[in-house]
């Protein structure tokens, strides 16, 4: 457009590789897409959770202006730089430090009274670390653990890098991920044998943490940060590494749980148990969720792509994700006093690393969509009563047939303005309380789970169970339990006591 919304001033430019040959264009349509405007009339995430912990987001320079900045300041009171404080960004050549981009993020946060996490000083795997770090002065020869001069050189480089970075940012940073992703459960010592380890052994952790303590302002918290800490073996390794560092007097204040989760893993219970386990063993250890997002793909699925051939992520899956976020934040609230902060790895679905990892594909892992509008994931965090299918209820609506051969009908009612998706009854049990003992036989309409499907807004769905009471007294009493679920993570149980045949 020559000028915004100027009638008659829209031009289409076409460049063809066919030279001067004539060609036709067919089925052309020009569509106006309105500018992105964030919702101002919805609750702030960080204000909603202010009595529990600060809520942060990973940012890059595109988040510091326009609607992204508005979204950031409305919903978050903490930030972490996604990439701009890592070694390759801050010291691309030895001794040449570049903080310009990170400084802009820190200045923005400071201007809006936001906390700032520092991420990260040493990445154990060598990811996003310049190649020169692991080479001798000639820039070609790889450092070797067998060469004392190389051991000394890498030690000095770690100390120098940490000294310059933490002193540059000073008290603006309240917590540093000093070592990122140091764990490997497949190694006897539970540590990743990356390029730092190959030269310095496990001692590189102590070198980095002691340097950070020496140069960071007093009160700065020093963390190690890792992923899949809900995995039992990885959690066991995390506990072992923390215990070893503590035993040797190495300064360590906290642990970051990345939580790059999937729609099916880990369970909310596993997240609760991982953080509780560390809190029991190390009562004064700080803990944070540092990189939360929830992929719409199953764990281990590195091939599917809902966006292929113009496709989209199913609405039912977006609803399921919303209910999963609700379960996660229910856990986080329960961990009040044991969990210091929760940081999401991004603001909205228009800018997520999962669009290119583990493959290039459409993923929608965050609380706001590609137009920065609130998704079910957002409502799962701030107000679950607005989730699709919220308020779903089950009732025993009729009992028909002769006393010895009854048909009990269960009805599910969805009062919400959105569908209650993939609704299922997962069981049906009768436990006798009074009367001469008997054993009624229940025949469900199908194998469990009994599928009711998607229940439309303000609608109901029913199913019938056949019960043989042939050897039961009409005065016998039973307690009925009917567990159910919808959108996988919305769950409940219909409980009716003292029911007669």
Image (spheres, helix red, strand yellow):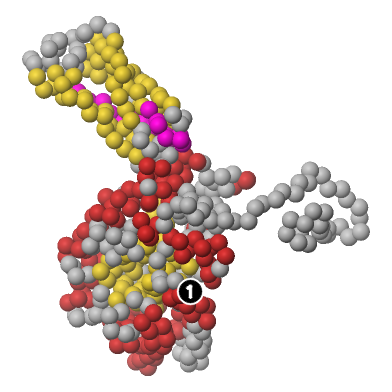
Q: Residue at x 40, y 31 (%)?
A: 414
In the rendered view of the protein, which quadrant contains the C terminus? top left
Q: Nearer the viewer, residue 378 or 406?
A: 378
Q: Residue at x 52, y 45 (%)?
A: 313
Question: Range of the magenta residues?
Answer: 413-430
x and y, in percent, of residue 265 in the image: 36, 50
Query: Is label 1 in a helix, a strand or a loop?
Result: helix
Q: Nearer the viewer, residue 464 or 202?
A: 464
Q: Is residue 42 visible?
A: yes
In the rendered view of the protein, which quadrant contains the N terminus? bottom right
Image vertical order of residue 119 relative to residue 73, above or below: below
x and y, in percent, of residue 269 in the image: 27, 50
Q: Residue at x 31, y 19 (%)?
A: 397
| Horizontal side of residue 297 vs 179, given as left or right | right
Image vertical order of residue 404 relative to residue 67, above or below: above
Residue 423 highlighted magenta (yes or no) = yes
In the image as oriented, which residue stretches furthest toward the left? 436
Q: Is residue 119 visible?
A: no
Residue tagged by mark 1? 108
Residue 499 highlighted magenta (yes or no) = no
x and y, in percent, of residue 55 in the image: 37, 62
């Amino acid at each position: 457009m020559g000028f915004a919304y100027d009638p008659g001033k829209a031009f289409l430019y076409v460049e063809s590789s066919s030279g001067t040959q004539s060609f036709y264009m067919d089925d052309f349509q020009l569509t106006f897409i309105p500018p992105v405007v964030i919702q101002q009339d919805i609750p702030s995430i960080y204000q909603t959770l202010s009595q529990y912990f600060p809520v942060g987001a990973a940012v890059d320079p595109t988040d510091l202006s326009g609607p992204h900045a508005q979204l950031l300041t409305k919903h978050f009171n903490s930030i972490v730089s996604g990439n701009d404080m890592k070694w390759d960004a801050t010291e691309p050549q030895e001794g040449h430090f570049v903080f310009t981009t990170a400084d802009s993020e820190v200045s923005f946060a400071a201007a809006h009274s936001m906390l700032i996490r520092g991420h990260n000083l040493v990445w154990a795997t060598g990811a996003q670390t310049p190649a020169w770090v692991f080479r001798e002065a000639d820039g070609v020869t790889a450092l070797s653990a067998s060469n004392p001069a190389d051991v000394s050189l890498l030690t000095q480089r770690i100390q120098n890098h940490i000294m310059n970075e933490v002193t540059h940012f000073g008290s603006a940073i309240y917590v540093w991920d000093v070592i990122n992703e140091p764990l490997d459960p497949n190694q006897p010592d539970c540590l990743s044998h990356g390029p730092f380890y190959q030269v310095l052994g496990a001692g590189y952790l102590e070198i980095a943490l002691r340097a950070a303590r020496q140069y960071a302002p007093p009160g700065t918290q020093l963390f190690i940060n890792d992923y899949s800490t809900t995995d039992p073996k990885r959690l066991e390794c995390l506990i072992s590494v923390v215990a070893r560092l503590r035993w040797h007097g190495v300064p360590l204040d906290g642990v970051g749980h990345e939580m790059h989760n999937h729609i099916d893993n880990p369970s909310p219970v596993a997240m609760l148990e991982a953080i509780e386990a560390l809190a029991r063993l190390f009562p004064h250890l700080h803990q944070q969720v540092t990189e939360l997002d929830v992929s719409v793909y199953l764990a281990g699925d590195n091939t599917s792509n809902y966006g292929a051939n113009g496709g989209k992520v199913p609405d039912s899956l977006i609803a399921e994700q919303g209910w999963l976020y609700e379960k996660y934040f229910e856990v986080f609230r329960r961990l009040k006093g044991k969990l210091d902060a929760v940081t999401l790895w991004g603001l909205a679905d228009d800018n997520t690393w999962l669009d290119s990892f583990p493959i290039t594909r459409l993923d929608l892992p965050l609380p706001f969509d590609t137009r920065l509008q609130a998704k079910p994931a957002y409502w799962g965090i701030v107000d679950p009563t607005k989730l699709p299918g919220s308020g779903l209820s089950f009732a025993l609506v009729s009992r028909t047939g002769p006393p010895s051969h009854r048909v009990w009908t269960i009805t599910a009612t969805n009062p919400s303005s959105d569908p209650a998706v993939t609704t299922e009854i997962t069981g049906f049990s009768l436990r006798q309380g009074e009367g001469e003992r008997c054993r009624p036989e229940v025949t469900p309409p199908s194998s469990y789970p009994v599928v009711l499907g998607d229940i439309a807004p303000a609608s109901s769905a029913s199913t019938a169970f056949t019960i043989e009471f042939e050897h039961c007294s009409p005065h016998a009493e039973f307690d009925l339990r009917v567990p159910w679920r919808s959108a996988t993570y919305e769950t409940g149980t219909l409980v009716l006591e003292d029911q007669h045949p």
